[in-house]
Image (cartoon, rainbow, N blue to C red):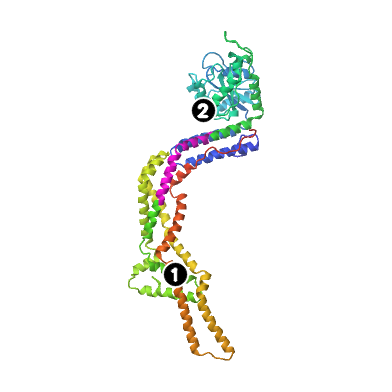
Amino acid sequence: MRGEALGAAVPEDAARLEAIAADLAALEARLGKLSLWRPAAALRALCAGTLRAVRAIAARRERPLVAVLVGPSGAGKSTLVNALAGGEEIAAAGRRRPTTERVAVFASSAGEAEAVAALLGGEAAAVPAAGVPAGMVLVDTPDTDSIGAERHRAAVDRAVEEADLLLCVFDAENPKRRDAVDRLEPLVRRFDGRSVLIVVNKCDRLDEADSRGAVLDDFRGHLAAAWGVALEPPLAVSARRHLREPAWDPGAEPRHGGDRFAELRERLAAAAAAGRAERRLENALRLRELLYAEVEAALTVRRPALEAARALLARAQAGALEQALAVLERGEGFAAGEAAALLQRQVAAAWSGPLGWLLLLWYRLSGPGDGIFGRLAPWRSAARRRRAARFPFGDTPAAVGEAVRAWRLHLLAAWPEAAERLVAGGFDPAVRDPRVAEELAERVAAPLLSRFPGWVEETLGATARRFAAWPVQALFNAPVVGMLGWIGVEAVVSFFRGRILPGDYFTHGFWATLLVGLLSFTVLQIALRPAGNPQRLLRRARARFSGAAARHLARLTDHPLPVEIEEVLRLPGAPAGPPPQGR
């Protein structure tokens, strides 16, 4: 819904209405994805209805301001409409209840009245009334508490859905009737407080002092508490006084001549002249606020159970991870010789200089699986060498399968309690089925644990990179390079001095250099020995993997259940939207 599809009078209002509709559409989409959380279906239906109402507000464009009169039987709504329409008795008024049997639409323009009547559908009647303020349509509705209230409920609701302004009319002689106030609450709460006018009719039946001041303030507070809406001050009027032929009932003549009918007309005229876009935006914001409040209310009563379920699942997943890692660490085939040989291979591949040649020669001679001595070792069968070459850190598929089983058993043990918390939090009772836990374990554990050998290899690679750093290479190559440099310099200097060095010098130099190289190589091997210890490598790999796995489990997306739990707990409360202009 773009620009011209919105009913705001200015681009800014159009954009703000569009933003409200986008908020509601996004919330509806989020609720639609919550297939396991039972309250989501009702909330989504409510969201769809609210979105339709906001789009209806946006689609009104330049339509006149629609003011709908609602109230209990005997409040004088039809009399008030007649007074507002110029004083002619054009709406049925009398003692018979209900007086108004169908929705009646009054406007100074016949075309405007007919357009709104057609929009309301049913048996809504269009009534031209020259006295209605320009730019406004008045809608008279059946009583909310008469014997035909249920029959007329749909028509009243439809009229209220199209309303920009709600006039709640009460009988001054008994305005606090609880049934009347309660019946109006679901209608009023859909509007911003500035879009609700409280009219206390028949004020001439009371003492003049009782029809204003503290009495009205008390009534305003009573309604605000019952409806949860901040209301404008009520207006006490005598609608019949402003008919051309009041036709007072015998014995019910007015007790005084004061009322605020003129102020009521002025407020309606001002709203019709300048307040359409603002009024509609206020009401759209109110609808959004009510929807978000419903979502928050549905979540508030269930949040403790859901948070407890999430915590239980988190602990169960963490415990399952520990159990699975313990199984992986005991995996067959990860022997000390293999770990050391793999470290030797990676170090030798990265080294240069004299010690690099020695490291490479040593690995080619002794490396398990592909070294000369390793191939001839009688204790290594061909099958074991092939398995070690394919899975250097044990029989990976078998180890991962065993680890997944350990994960599943641990999760199944914790599942009944977590499932009960989920059901208490509104989730479908089907989550109690142990197969849900088994599926969760399979879909989460197998992909996660299959990456553990890679973390061991990465840990081994990081160790090899530390030993292959250039300062370490320089340190261990320095004695050999120094010996070679010393022998070379001595030979060159002697040659230029005309002195030929004996062959024994070079023989001794060769053996001395070799001895120094072997000593450096031995020291390096002594340093590599603990670094290639399998338990040490596994501890380091496990520490690194556990942190990454915990982060993965915290944002788990491998199974719909944990995703849905997080989505439910992130459902929004009342949004901090921009206030309407002029507030």
The residue positioned 36% from the left and 64% from the top of the image is 333
Q: Position of residue 443 (x, y in %)?
A: 41, 51
In the image, 359: left or right of 257? left
Q: Position of residue 133 (x, y in %)?
A: 65, 23
Task: Pick the residue in front: 413 or 148.
Answer: 413
The residue positioned 66% from the left and 29% from the top of the image is 274
In the image, 322: left or right of 237? left
SS under mark 1: helix
Provide the major secondary structure of the magenta segment.
helix
Above or below residue 406? Residue 531 is: below
**Type of the residue with mark 1:** Leu
How far is the residue under mark 2 from the one under mark 1?
78 Å
Query: Disc 2 marks which residue?
Result: 186
Residue 528, disc: 1
Q: Quadrant of the C terminus?
A: top right
Above or below residue 345? Residue 12 is: above
SS under mark 2: helix
First in sequence: mark 2 or mark 1?
A: 2
The image quadrant that residue 9 belongs to is top right
Q: Decide: marks 2, 1 in contact (CB < 8 A)?
A: no
Q: Position of residue 131 (x, y in %)?
A: 65, 20
Frontmost of labels 2 and 1 is 1
How packed is label 2: few (under 14 Cα within 10 Å), some, or many (20 or more)?
few
Q: Quadrant of the N terminus?
A: top right
Task: Pick the residue in front: 363 or 221.
Answer: 221
> What is the magenta range?
290-318
Q: Position of residue 449 (x, y in %)?
A: 41, 56
Count all numbered tags in the image, as a single digit. Answer: 2
**Type of the residue with mark 2:** Pro
* Residue closest to the far top: 250
Above or below residue 75? Residue 454 is: below
